[in-house]
Amino acid sequence: MDEKGVDESRVDAVFSVLPEDTNIYGNLFGGKLVEWIDRTAAIVAVRHSRKNVVTANIDNLSFLEPIKLGDIVILKAWINYVGNTSMEVQVDVYNERRSNGKPLLACRAYLTYVAIDENGKPTPVPRLILKTEEEKLRFQQALDRKNQRLKMREMILGK
Ligand SMILES: CC(C)(COP(=O)(O)OP(=O)(O)OC[C@H]1O[C@@H](n2cnc3c(N)ncnc32)[C@H](O)[C@@H]1OP(=O)(O)O)[C@@H](O)C(=O)NCCC(=O)NCCS
């Protein structure tokens, strides 16, 4: 199985908030942002694995800043962790106000994707090459989050 670096799957996506994306107060729907996050992060997982992937988990979705009609939304997504068949992707969402162009961190999310084979069963993905100290730290932190998620899954399944 080959190996890949973090930069080989990184994705930057940009959206502009249109009337159909907002509620009656002119704020971006949270669900619309989750859709953009999931679609962007899934591309990172596909680029890393070059396989079909499913979303296994989305966590730590904190909406930190309102996003309004006409705002420019920038999603920066990259891979933090690779296990045997799963990958954790981080998405940082910035709101670039039209008025001053200053990007504010509006939301951060961690998503776990699992690569699946033609029978829908988990299948191995390339290992992650960690080049920088920051990448090594993010990998360790993602491993801690993975263990928490698996505990949560056991709780939900009543194990
Ligand atoms: C995700 C899924 C493929 C896992 O299948 P499974 O047979 O339970 O898989 P396993 O227990 O063997 O785990 C496979 C990997 O997924 C990870 N995983 C499974 N469930 C997870 C969860 N809830 N959160 C984080 N990671 C999870 C495991 O840690 C493991 O990772 P590793 O191989 O890197 O160590 C399966 O639960 C599934 O198909 N879920 C539905 C996905 C879907 O439809 N998503 C779209 C929702 S709209």
Image (tube, rainbow, N blue to C red):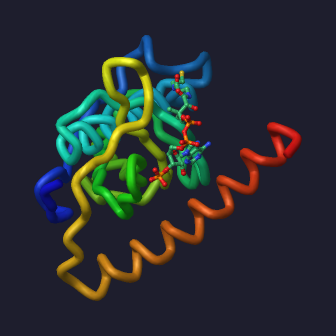
Residue 19 visible, this orientation:
yes
Name of the residue lying farthest toward the bottom: 133
Where is residue 63 shown, x and y percent of the image? 58, 48
Q: Please tell me which residue is depicted at 20% across the width and 71% down the height of the picture.
A: 129
Outermost right residue:
158
Give the left or right position of residue 8, taking residue 24 as reference: left
In the image, taking residue 7 as reference, residue 141 lies left or right, namely right
Quadrant field for ligand 1: top right
- Give the vertical position of 83 relative to 27 (above or below): below
Q: Is residue 144 left or right of residue 69?
A: right
Name the residue located 30 percent from the left edge and 36 percent from the top edge: 40
Q: Residue at x 30, y 76 (%)?
A: 135
Front in this rendered view, residue 54 or 117: 117
Q: Position of residue 69 (x, y in %)?
A: 42, 28
Which quadrant holds residue 79?
A: bottom left
In the rendered view, would you say 39 is above or below 106? above
Q: Closest to the observer: 27 or 76?
A: 76
- The answer to whether any part of residue 91 appears in the image is no
Q: Residue furthest top?
A: 20
Horizontal relation, residue 119 to residue 150: left or right: left
Q: Is residue 159 above or below residue 140?
A: above
The residue shown at (39%, 47%) is 85
* Quarter of the image that includes the N terminus: bottom left
Where is residue 25? Give x, y as percent.
Answer: 61, 24
In front: 26, or 30?
30
Q: Position of residue 10 (x, y in %)?
A: 19, 53
How many numbered markers are drawn? 0
